[in-house]
Image (tube, rainbow, N blue to C red):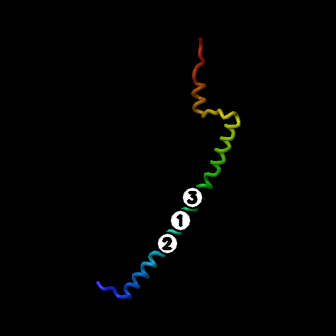
Amino acid sequence: MNCTEAYKEHIEYTFNAFCSVVIRYAAINAWRDRDIRRQRESELLPLKTDMSTKIRRTTSNGGLSLPCSSSVLMNSHPPKTE
């Protein structure tokens, strides 16, 4: 198949237009993903600060803290009688 110069030029312009559209929508998706990630991180920020204050409280008492379930298990055993 013999391609004329005009047809080759048409293919080139069509491909360039296609690439421009793909790049444009890739940029739009990247900005949207970035905004969603920032929104999720800002929603998690109060949880992160809450966890950091809990960590500071547990390390201020000597670093020995038991989770609630462990302390309940330890306190649920009857005292030893001899």
Question: Which quadrant of the rendered structure holds the N terminus?
Answer: bottom left
The residue to which callout 1 is attached is 30
The residue to which callout 3 is attached is 37
Q: Which residue occupies 66% across, 45% down?
A: 52
The residue to which callout 2 is attached is 23
Q: Secondary structure at mark 2?
A: helix
Residue 81 in the image, given as x and y percentages of width and height:
59, 13
Q: Which residue occupies 49% across, 72% down?
A: 23
Q: Secondary structure at mark 1?
A: helix
**Do labels 2 and 1 touch, CB within 8 Å?**
no
Residue 15 in the image, given as x and y percentages of width and height:
42, 78
Q: Quadrant of residue 62?
A: top right
Question: Which quadrant of the rendered structure holds the C terminus?
Answer: top right
- Work out which residue is located at the far left of the displayed protein and give it: 1
The amino acid pointed to by label 3 is Arg
Q: Is residue 63 above or below residue 4?
A: above
The amino acid pointed to by label 1 is Ala
- Work out which residue is located at the far right of the displayed protein and give it: 60
N-terminal-most mark, 3 or 1: 1
Q: Which mark is residue 4?
A: none
Q: Is residue 43 above or below residue 7?
A: above
